[in-house]
Amino acid sequence: MDKIYDFEWLVREIDDTLFLIAGDGKEVIGNYQANDILLETLDDALVKFANIQDLTNFINYGIVRFVNSENEDDFIDVPIINILLLYKDTNELGKKDKIIKIEELHTYMRHNDQIISYGYIIYPYKIGKLSEDGMAILKIANSFDSLSMNEKIGALQKINLINYQKTKSYESLKR
């Protein structure tokens, strides 16, 4: 039976290096932390080792769920292909200069039992440095659509190898 990987290490790295504050332009509605990587079907993003379709689904349909620290029912789902945008436009603690409109991320959020896809803004804050491996995956995801077929296969192989190595080291740390 093929081993299945869940990218838990990447969720932890994002959680350790980035948090989001969401607002409506007038007031803050919550602080959000990375909680999980899901597929658009809201299933866990599980990848069988060296399975091209699973890896492609991870890139094309994967979302990182950021959960409100005060109300776990409220969340922001950001496509994995757009997480790099959050790292590129980060703020320093104590400053709120850079914003990203929720519609720029091609995403939605849940707040007070409502699904919101426009009109809200996100302040991304970088609180640590993402590993080279984590950044490599985000860069591949962000540029995946523009790659040739051969480049896509190479990129998927790279993601597979990174995920395998990081999962092994992550699992050994948990023991």
Image: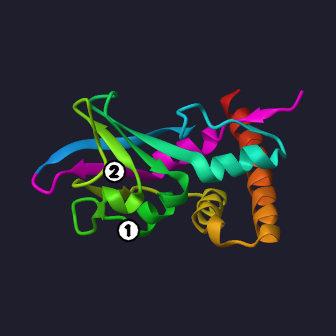
**Residue sitting at x 55%, y 38%:** 38
In the rendered image, which quarter contains the N terminus?
Answer: top right
* Upstream in sequence: badge 2 or badge 1: 2
Disc assigned to residue 44 = none
Q: Is residue 163 visible?
A: no
Q: Position of residue 68 (x, y in %)?
A: 32, 36
SS at circle 2: strand
Q: Nearer the viewer, residue 75 or 129?
A: 75
Residue at image location 53% in from the left, 40% down from the top: 40
Of all residues, the one furthest to the right in this rendering is 1
Look at the image and give the residue range highlighted in magenta.
1-26
Residue at numbered disc 2: 20
Query: Residue 91 lies in what quarter of the image?
Result: bottom left
Q: Amino acid at mark 2?
A: Leu
Residue located at (58% from left, 47% from top): 61
Farthest residue to the left: give it: 26
In the image, residue 107 lies at what x, y percent? 40, 51
Residue 171's image quarter? top right
Q: Does the segment drawn in magenta span residue 167?
A: no
Where 150 sits versus 168, above or below? Answer: below
Give the quarter of the figure containing the C terminus.
Answer: top right
Q: Is residue 164 above or below residue 94?
A: above
Q: Is residue 6 magenta?
A: yes
Residue 89 is marked as: 1
Residue 174, image x and y in percent?
66, 30
